[in-house]
Amino acid sequence: MKLKSKICAAPYLVWMVAFIVAPLLMVIYFAFTDKAGHFTLENLSGLSQYSSVFIRSILLAAIATVICLFLAYPLSFMLSRLRVNKQRIMLMLVMLPMWMNFLLRTYAWMTLLERNGLINSFLGLFGIGPFNMINTQGAVVLGMVYNYLPYMILPLYTIMVKIDNSLIEAAEDLGANLFHKVTKVLIPLSMPGITTGITMVFVPSVSTFIISRMLGGGSNMMIGDLIELQFLGNSYNYNLGSAMSLVLMVVVLLCMSVTNMMDGENKEGGVI
Amino acid sequence: MENTIVALKDIVVDFDGEAVLTGLSLDIHDKEFVTLLGPSGCGKTTTLRVIGGFLEPKSGNVFFDGKDITGMPPYKRQVNTVFQKYALFPHLNVYENVAFGLRLRKVEEKEIKTRVLGMLEMVGLRGFERRDPTTLSGGQQQRVAIARALVNHPRVLLLDEPLGALDLKLRKEMQTELKRIQKNLNITFIYVTHDQEEALTMSDTVVVMNGGDIQQIGTPVDIYNEPKNAFVADFIGESNILSGVMERDFCVEFSGQQFACVDKGFAPRELVDVVVRPEDVQVVPAIQGQLSGVVKSVIFKGVHYEIIVEQAGFEWKIHSTQSQQPGEFIGMNIGPDEIHIMHRMEEAAR
Amino acid sequence: MKKMSFLSKAYMVLIFSFMYVPIAVMAVFSFNESKSRSNFTGFTFDWYINLFRNDMILSALGLSLVIALVASVIATILGTMASIGIHSMHRASRTVIMNISYLPVINPEIITGVSMMLLFVVVKNWMGGKVFGMPTLLIAHITFCVPYVIFNVSPKLRQMDVRMWEAALDLGCTPVQAFFKVVLPEIMPAVFSGFLICLTYSIDDFIISYFTSGTLQTLPIAIYSMTRKKVSPEINALSTIMFVVILSIILFVNAQDSRRQKKSSARRS
């Protein structure tokens, strides 16, 4: 019986090898060859001239991730302590913007942050400004936070609803103040949610090219923009683009192994 | 003798190299209530699954009504199973669950209806046809599972710890109920349980299993009164098991004393296991006892007191209607009829 | 539960306004007569009318729906079959397959997009002719959808009592009948939710499509090209419509859910 049902997986296995494994092998192949197909390390060594872009990407993504964590942590806790039917509604409110295409969400901020956009004209009523908000790194971070905040809230919330109130009360009973309640009880217990949230915000942030392009203008390029230029932009250099992709993958893998280490053994799955 | 309906011959089963059944042979007589009894991991459920066809033995043969059915898939066998935790189909209502097997056999709709309703009547669930099985209580789900199996008129019904999930009172009820159904339908039931009391109450024949093989086959009375080895004695009811030496016929030595007994035919000075049931030990004043010891603890168990007495490093378990004081020095007497002597088990089986 | 303190209430209001004010602003300005993004000069439906006359948007929407539907159906079948096969495999091979399936989920989307593009380019160089288009788009969408089906269906299979399957065989089902009569109905909710996830991910996807579509325009790609033009209030209108559509779908699904819950709890009591 068992033998026969294994065959059901065969079509997918073929598909998986052809369209998941093979493309990634292509990336590796292209990263280590030149246009003529000869082995070279030049693509990778040539990346040093883009180091500022790499550093900026990681930095902006890290800032956005930290802001998301700080904004989402208290909110998730509050959500998890609401009455159950209220939780349902609030959770829906958290997810609703996620369902809207992120291009539209980002576009919304484009219009808000513009020099003659709503925020500046609102501030103008009080005689302040206008400020130069769009096409700055701040705008890029704002865009990341706005787009990926739900990805931080959801895993945190899922882990926090499982934390029993009695645990917190027990800590209180044993003389913990607010600070200790958070650092000694809440944070250790919600660690798996924190790490999942960090990965889920950092990975799309560090690899984005839309947010930086729409809110950062031309001057705040990120890794994603560079890669996109090599494949569809004016640069057209698949080999260099592959090398960049490879480095990006390494960055992502590093981020995940760091969070994995933070997590220790008690690994919980993500929300999706 | 009655004719054999299911016969297992030298069945060997192993999972990933670990032996589960080690050459088991068993004849099951038609129209009997047979119980496979043993601790978990003894191979009783595996035996049942071999009969049901869910597991193919590595070697050995399964015969049904004299025909070799080894390797025949379950859906072609004339047996049906009541599964552990019932395995009712949650997407079908009670009626459709029971009708499932008949539908597959393309039985006429009218006949399906009479048979399903008749079966629900028998298990006391008329009026529950439209209910979702998940909304039923454990006992009711159990009845549906039984009806679903029996409606197909199997010659043999396999039951895999069917009462395991029920509470004590319900178990007792269902035990009588199952016995009644088996009598009414006059078919073979093969019943798997680890509960010795259940096995003794319901069965015509009890098969005690351990370590992948059969320890003893017999009527409940035989098994209880004449356990063949210390394992059976220990598993069926509570026992004091001591090692002793058979001095000669009708005389055995254990705990430093010689006792009269009713057993004979052992080799001279053969090392034996001696089994004494806790209720068979009489408590007497210390000087009158064949043995004497110190009461270590007394626990009230409802019908009797369980008294633990230490004597020469062995802790005797005694059931008595009279309480004793812990620390007291008491005597113990054991009549010749109450001493069961059996050949020493190999260490492996213990 | 104690009443929530004023501070936490204020905090929640603040975060939720951060999340919803931009959307609300877009909705308001979708009715703005002028193209200004800061002054509301008058009420109009013009942008909505323009939107429905915009062939580019309409054909992109059509393409997105077709791709989503076809890709989701294929991905659901492929993924369900895969789950069943994987379920009966040994632990080691199961872990390997699951981990590879995780790649498109954890990899940055741009990497998935770029890597598939490379594959298609290589195929194109070999075979020549036009490669990019509907087939590549479909392949890409199926590829990133299948894992979600597997991750939905596999746990359900694991939850399922093996005895359910055995009971079906016991009652006379052949293995194939047992699958369709017992296993499939049992895992159907998971299969269906997997299908829905595929639909939403496929319709929503921009990055992977962007690299694999050639010259075809799905709805997100069309939106992207619209945002490149500086001022286009049709986007506001489109966003508003999408928001309303999503909101009503969610409300509808939720209402269904709570009705079903009420029904089942009523039956239980």
Image: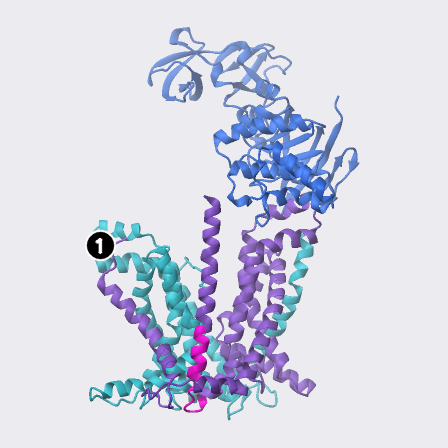
Chain B: its colour in the image is blue
Q: Position of residue C188 (x, y in %)?
A: 58, 57
As drawn, the chain in purple is C
**Residue C233 forms part of the magenta stretch:** yes
Residue B337 falls in image quadrant? top right
Q: Position of residue B283 (x, y in %)?
A: 42, 11
Residue in the picture at 30% in, 52% down: A165
Give the image quarter of residue C241: bottom left
Asked whether, in this view, residue B22 is left or right of residue A240, the answer is right
When asked about the image quadrant of residue A198, the answer is bottom left
Q: Disc 1 designates what residue?
A: A176
Give the magenta-colored segment's residue range. Answer: C228-244
Where does the image place residue B217, in percent across and percent down from the top left?
A: 65, 25
Query: Against C176, is B314 above or below?
Result: above
Callout 1 secondary element: loop
Name the magenta segment's main secondary structure.
helix
Viewer can see residue A227: no
Look at the picture and state if B37 lies above or below A181: above
Q: Residue furthest bottom?
A: A234
Q: Amino acid at mark 1?
A: Ala
Q: Position of residue A66 (x, y in %)?
A: 33, 72
The cyan one among the chains is A
